[in-house]
Amino acid sequence: MERKLNEDKFNLTNRLNKLVLLSKKIEIIEKQFQEENKKLKEENIKINEKITEMEKTINELKNKINTSKKDIDIIDLDEVKIDSSIMIDDELKFIKSAIEKRMNLKIKDIKRIYQATIDGKEPLNFHKKCDGKRNTLILYKSEGNRRFGGYASEPWESKNYFKIDDNCFLFSLDRKMIFPPKKFTKYKMQIDCNSKLGPGFLRKDKYCIGIFEKGLLKTEESRHKKLFKGDKHMLSECGLRHYINLNEYEVFKINFFD
């Protein structure tokens, strides 16, 4: 009987020990689970924070896009302004239309880069401010209040040669007329890139507009009728005068929408 009791006691003790070991294993596993669960919660918090941050960024970008769309919607592409002492905004409309049609681009803005009475009338001052600039609008005003100009798509330079410009044209502001080069003439339209002269337009060696004397503003309309369509006296102040004195001219850089 005693032997039986000892065996039972041993078995119980053994089972108890196993239960204790199992209980410790459970505690360890539970502790590991809690640690892993804590890590997962922390990671989840970080993920949620990143998600929240990303959603905030996305919403900010959406708001910017919507604002930009509204700004674009309210932009009137025809409401381009010009800060000129020669041309007024209403006169700009028909010049703007002619440039956009010729270049097949919409004008974004027009910035003045040179004014003779402010920056200096000498050709050196013009070339310092304007060389390397393409898509320029040149406005001239005579002592007799004739106002006219030209558009050049090619950049101005100081290399003492004439540069072909198929997109350039002349115009009269006070008569609101465009004078594109005649198609049938064999000589292409050019701009004068002479370092000793101001901005000029010509065909071959025949000046249509030129600024010649150093420190003195002059322009010429020589043989204008043969080179351009329209009024042959667009620059003259009285009949057939070829030379007129200028009291101002300005150069503007034209920027287009991409």
Image (cartoon, rainbow, N blue to C red):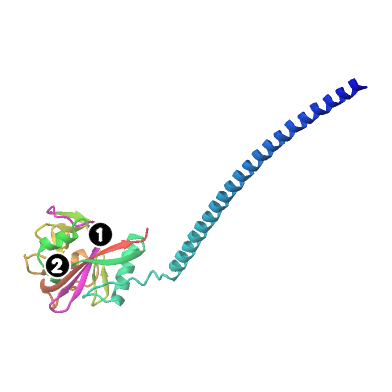
Q: Position of residue 147 (x, y in %)?
A: 20, 75
Give the mark nearer the N terminus: 1 vs 2. Answer: 2
Residue that badge 1 annotates? 184
> Which one is in front, 59 or 2?
2
Residue that badge 2 annotates? 119
User: Element under label 2?
Assistant: helix
- Identity, as a three-letter code, of the amino acid under mark 2: Asp
Quarter holding the C terminus is bottom left
Image-based side of 52 in relation to 179, left or right = right
Give me the residue at 52% from left, 58% from top. Answer: 56
- Identity, as a three-letter code, of the amino acid under mark 1: Phe
Q: Position of residue 117 (x, y in %)?
A: 13, 71
> Which one is in front, 223 or 212?
212
Whether 155 is among the magenta residues is: yes
Q: Position of residue 154 (x, y in %)?
A: 24, 56
Quadrant of residue 244 within the rendered picture: bottom left
- Image position of 41 with respect to 27: above or below: below
Number of numbered discs: 2
Give the magenta range.
133-160
- Image position of 205 with respect to 29: above or below: below
Whether 251 is among the magenta residues is: no
Q: Position of residue 171 (x, y in %)?
A: 24, 70
Of tags 1 and 2, which is closer to the observer?
2
- Image position of 173 with respect to 212: above or below: below
- Image position of 217 with respect to 203: above or below: below
Image-based side of 49 in relation to 72, left or right = right
